[in-house]
Image (cartoon, rainbow, N blue to C red):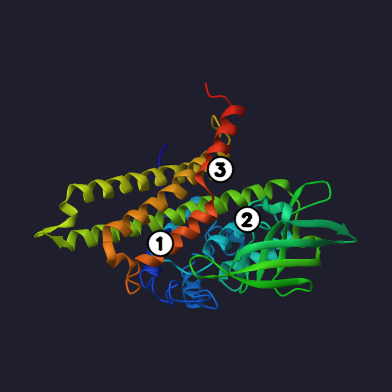
Amino acid sequence: MDFTFTEEQQAAVEAARAVFSGVAPDGVPSPALTAGAVADDFDRPLWRKLADADLLSLPIAPEHGGAGLDPIALCLVLRESAKVLARVPLLESGAAALTLQRYAADELRTEVLPPIAAGDLVVTVASAGRTGHEPAELAVSARREGAGWILDGTQTAVPWGSTADRILLPAHTTDGHAVLALVPRAHPGVTLDDQISTSGERQAEVRLDSVRISAREMIGDPAAWQSLRDVLTTGTCALALGLGERVLAMTGDYTGKREQFGYPVATFQAVAVQAADRFIDLRAMEATLWQAAWRITTDAPGPLPAAGDIAVAKIWASEGVRRVVQTAQHLHGGFGADTDYPLHRYHAWAKQLELSLGPAAAHEEALGNLLAAHPLG
């Protein structure tokens, strides 16, 4: 494997670092001290800066005002965003743009991709299903009626669902095929109920009651939902990696300055060993992330389908980000729980990412099934 990034990908990282350098992770009230959501909306000023830096248009083709880059570039930018806990729907918008670019009809692409690239149209994605514990495409039914479609069902925990302009959501047809629908948030039959994430951000339960949308707002290719889910999952792993790297850096800085018995606690063997273990976790998260991102970007063949590489990345990301923040809290001592210090915010975001990825045991079972179906050697 060659993890050397292209000049365009590296330029995207530099642009992202420049934009995120001015973002403070404690720009909103602490989720530990707030009964409801920490804010009513995502960070609109930051969203505008990302648009002005052409970072929202990265996965969009040049003919629609974008740079035509790939999921790897999106993951690189997401990694930087997580280091400052950027409160923007960058993952959802990027994943939706990639999917629309590849699978939507020409008319829909021409309508939505240019405003997405400019930051004027915000698209989020519903991927948790009705309960978060079942295939998301089964939560909503889609049936043809005349020249359009009728949608019925519920999608829960839709990030930024209360403030996004449109929601890209999976559904199932009467013959069991998965389709995608691009539904306007303010649309007859669409009802939104507020939900609050572990990180204190607003989410939405989206209920669809005989929602009628046109055929051009539907994506019928059965590969579209799988592709969207793969990008969302890989992007979430990138967020976990970026967050974990920032937390370990905070821990190294703190333990290097905090003294006991006249010595920095970082020089104590027990502290150094724990920090080293977490460094190993992060390097494993990084290697498995780029392997998964490379597979979905290139469609390269392998001994297992790309789902195997994605499962491995999810295993490391969900377990690794939890271990990193728990060790950080331990090595910070009581200072780590101080709500004037941002570590507790990273812990809350890490738990939200862990919950989004799901338990490692489930991914290990999926990987085992793939190995059984595709014997190696």
The residue indicated by pointer 1 is 347
Q: Residues within 10 Å of mark 3 (few under 14, many from 20)?
A: few
Cα distance between the residues tagged 1 and 3: 22 Å
Give above or below for 137 relative to 14: above
Number of disc labels:
3
Q: Residue at position x 62%, y 59% from top?
A: 96
**Res 290 quadrant in image:** top left
Q: Which mark is residue 306?
A: none
Q: Residues within 10 Å of mark 2 (few under 14, many from 20)?
A: some
- Identify the element where label 2 is drawn: loop
The residue indicated by pointer 2 is 132
Residue at the extreme right: 146
The residue indicated by pointer 3 is 362
Which quarter of the rendering shows the N terminus? top left
Q: Is residue 196 left or right of residue 291?
A: right
Q: Looking at the image, tell me whether mark 2 or mark 1 is earlier in sequence order.
A: 2
- Identify the element where label 3 is drawn: helix
Q: Residue at position x 56%, y 29% from top?
A: 371
Q: Is residue 31 visible?
A: yes
Q: Label 2 sits on what residue type? A: Gly
- Identify the element where label 1 is drawn: helix
Give above or below for 192 relative to 150: below
**Toward the viewer: 310 or 205?**
205
Q: Label 3 sits on what residue type? A: Ala
- Residue 34 in the image, given as x and y percentages of width and height: 47, 76
Residue at the extreme left: 262
- Residue 288 in the image, given as x and y percentages of width and height: 44, 42
